[in-house]
Amino acid sequence: MTQTPIISIRNVTKRFGSFTALEDISIDIRPGEIFALLGPSGCGKSTLLRIIAGFETPTEGDILIDGKDMTEVPPNKRPVNMVFQSYAVFPHMSVADNVAYGLKMDKLPAAEIKTKVAEALKQVHLSEFSHRMPDQLSGGQRQRVALARALVKRPRVLLLDEPLSALDAKLRDAMRLELVKLQQTVGVSFIMVTHDQSEALAMADRIAVLDQGRLRQLADPVTLYRKPADAFVADFIGRVNLFEVTAHEPGSTTATVASLGEIALAAAAAYPEGEALVLAVRPEHIRLTAGEGPGVPATLGDVAFQGDSSIVEVTLADGRSVQVLEDAAESARLMQLDPGAIVTLEIDWTKAAILRRSAL
Amino acid sequence: MARRRRQRPGPFDYSRKLSLQMVFVLATIFLYAPIIVLIIFSFNDSRRGGNVIWRGFTTDYYVKAANNASLIEAFTNSLTIAVISTIFSVILGAITAVVLWRWRFPLKPGFEGLVALPIVIPEICLGVAVAVFFSYFGLYVPPGTPWPFNLTNIIIAHITFSFPFAAMVIRTRLQSFNREMEEAAKDLGATEFQVFRDVILPHLKPGLIAGGLLAFTLSLDDFVITFFTSGPDTVTFPVKVYSMVRFSVTPEINAASTVLILITLVLTAIAMRYQSFGDDRQ
C-alpha cells in the first residue's frame, strides 16, 4: 500500500500569536480515498483544511500537492477546491452560473463550460434547477450546488468543511451515502473536516483524530474503534466506560482499578510502573443480569430506548455510573424492573482494553 | 359552540388599541400635512401677497415657474451638483467602507472617528470652515468660469459632508457579507480584483444605491453649507427659494417645490425597487 501520496502534509505547525493551533502534523493523503479530520471544536482541524486550501500559511512545515511544494501558492492557483461550511453559494448568480464560475476564471471556451456545467449538475441531480436562484433552493440543494461548483474544476482533492452540519438529521444521513457514492463516481480524494465521530466512521476510509492541535491517532475506522491509541481516542470514538487504573506493576497479573478493585489484568504489566493507565470497556462488552450473581454488583438507572437496542445506565457501589448496551429483548426485560433494582455486570475481559491516559 | 376568546392586545399592538391609533393618526398628520398643504397651494390662484387663502384652482404658477429663468437655472445647478457630488460620494464612501472593513492599520479607530466627524459637526460650523478654507488657500473658482465648472466649490463642499453618510450605509451592508463567499471565489480561481467585481460588488449594490440616494437628497436640499460657498452666479435651488421667500411666498415657490418633491419621490421609488432586487433573501 505504498501509493504516492496526492497531498503530503509535512511537519506542519501553525501558531496564532502565542496560541498553537497545530503542532507538528504530518499526514499523507492517498489518491481516491475519503479522509476525515476528526476532533472536538478548536482542535485545529479546520485550520489544517484551510492550510491545504491556501487560506492560511503554516508557521512551519510544508504542504505538497502531487509532490510540488504549495506552501507559497495562493488559493486561486491550487489544484484543490473546497466546499464551505456555509456553502457560500453566490446569491446573485443562478445555479448554472455558480457552477460555471470557476471554469470562467480558467478562461475555458463558452461551449466547453456549458457541457461541463450540464454534466456536473447532472451528477448532483440538479439539472432541472440550473436556472433557479440560490434563494429558491433548499439547504440540501444549495450544498449540491457547492459540490458541483467545486467538482466541475476537476480538483486533485476536494476539501469539505463540516459538509453535513448545516443539514437536518434525516437529510444528513441520506447525504452521507450520497457523498460516498459521489466520491466513488468521480474518483477524487475527499478530505472532510467533522466533529461528528459517527459521520467520520460511516464515511471515511481513514480518520485522523486531532486534539489541541496534535494528531492523536491516524487509522481506518475499525482500528480506531477496536484499538484506540489512548483514552482520548477511545472516549471520542463511540461510547466507552473508562476506569482509572490506580496501581499496577511490571510482572504482576493483577492490577487495581477504580470502582472495580483488584482484578486480573495481565495487560497492564506491559507498561512501566507509574504510567497513567485506564481500563476501557465498550458498552456492548458488558452484560447485565437481574439480581445478584458473580460479577460486579450495581443498581439499575435509566434505560434510553433506541429501537433496536437500549443504552442502560447503572450505578456501581461507589456511585460511578456505567453505560451498558443491551439488545431489544434484554432491554424490554430490564424495563420491567424498578429503577434502583439490584443487577450484576458481566464484563467481557477479552474485549476490555488497557490504554494510556494520553499517547502524547 | 365555544366563543373564541379574544386575546388581550399587546403593548404595541397599535391596530387594536384606540390610544395608539390616535397617536399614529396624529403623527401622520403632523408629518405630512405641511407637505400636502404645500402641494395644494401650488395650485392656488392667488394674485399677490400671502399665499394663505384659497382662491381657486390654476396651473399658471407651474408655467410661471417653468418660465422663471433664474429659478430654472438654480434648479439645474442643484441637480447638477447633486448628481456629481453623489457619484463622488459613493465612490469615496465605498472605498472608505471597504478599507475600514477589510484592513487593520494603526490608528484605525481614530480614522473611523474622523470619517464620521462631518456627520456630527454642526452644519453651520462646517459651512464656515469650508468657506474659510477656500478663501484662505485661494481655492475659489474665479467668477466667469463656464458652467458647470463654476460649481466646483459647492460640489467639493457637498462631497465633504455627504460621503461619510454613504460610507456608513455601505459599511453596514458590508457587515452582512459572508467572508466564505470571498474565499469560495478565490478557491475557484478568482484574483483579488475578480473577487471584488464578481462577489463583493454585487453584494454591495443595495448599499451603494441607498448611500447614493442619501447623498443625493442631502446635496439637493442643503442650504447652510451651500450658502457659504455659493456666489451670485452659482445659486442653488434652496438658496434661490430662500431669497424668493424673503419677498413673499408665492405659489410659484410651491410649484417648484412640488416638482422637487416629485423628483425625490420618483428617485426613491426607483432606488427601493433596485434595492429589493439586489437583496439576497437568504
Image: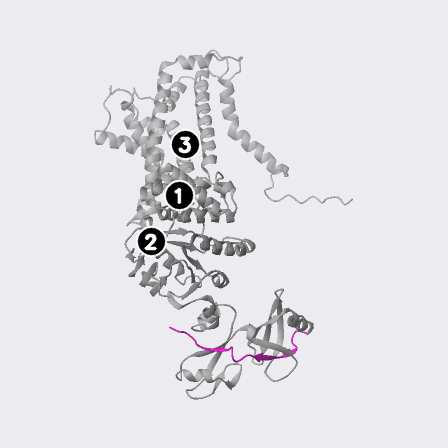
The chain letter under disc 2 is: A
- Disc 2 secondary structure class: loop
Q: Residue furthest right?
A: B1
Foreground of the two, B112 or A353: A353
Marks 1 and 2 close (CB-CB < 8 Å): no
Going 39% across and 21% down the picture, which residue do you hit? B241
Going 21% across and 31% down the picture, which residue do you hit? B137
Q: Amino acid at mark 3?
A: Leu
Residue highlighted by disc 1: B174
Quadrant hosting residue B172: top left
Indicate left or right for A109 with B44 as reference: left
Give the answer, above or below, for where B218 lies relative to B43.
below
Percent coordinates x, y for residue B13 in the rendering: 61, 41
Say whether residue A349 is magenta: yes
Quadrant hosting residue A160: bottom left
Residue highlighted by disc 3: B213
- Is tag 1's residue or tag 3's residue first in the polypeptide sequence? 1
The chain letter under disc 3 is: B
Q: Give the color scheme: rainbow, by chain, secondary structure or one colour.
A: one colour
Q: Amino acid at mark 1?
A: Leu
* Residue span colored magenta: A338-360
Foreground of the two, B77 or A220: A220
